Amino acid sequence: TAALARWHRTAKNSSKTDEFFALMHDEAVFHSSVVHTPLRGTPIAMAYLAAASQTLGNDSFAMSAT
């Protein structure tokens, strides 16, 4: 769909956080395997997505095969 294509375009350009806010529903619920409780609302969902993007979306991140 057009919304999913827009999401992928935005994800490739991490500087467009305002576009992520525009794409996300006001009552978004972020489920984290680390926190173990649903996190409700766009601001907290964006905070976790931004942190994950910074960690996983850089050249120094590598996965171990162990």
Image: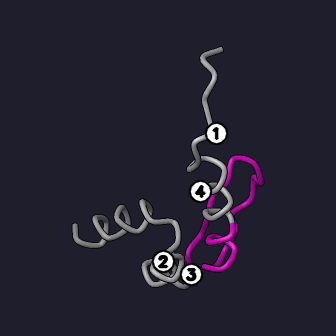
Image location (x, y in percent) of residue 53: 59, 56
Of pointers 4 and 3, the one earlier in the residue sequence? 3
Looking at the image, residue 41 lies above or below residue 48: below
Mark nearest the camera among 3 and 2 is 2
Mark nearest the camera among 4 and 3 is 4
Name which residue type carries label 2. Answer: Met
Q: CA distance from mark 4 to mark 3?
A: 21 Å
Image location (x, y in percent) of residue 4: 31, 65
Name which residue type carries label 4. Answer: Ser
Residue bounds of the magenta highlight: 28-47
Q: CA distance from mark 4 to mark 2?
A: 16 Å
Q: Residue 27 got which mark?
A: 3
Callout 1 crowding tier (Cα within 10 Å): few <14, some 14–19, many ≥20:
few
Q: Is residue 13 magenta?
A: no
* Residue on which disc 4 sits: 53
Residue at screen point 41% across, 68% down = 10
Label 2 near label 4: C-beta < 8 Å? no
Mark 3 secondary-structure assignment: loop
Q: Quadrant of the N terminus?
A: bottom left
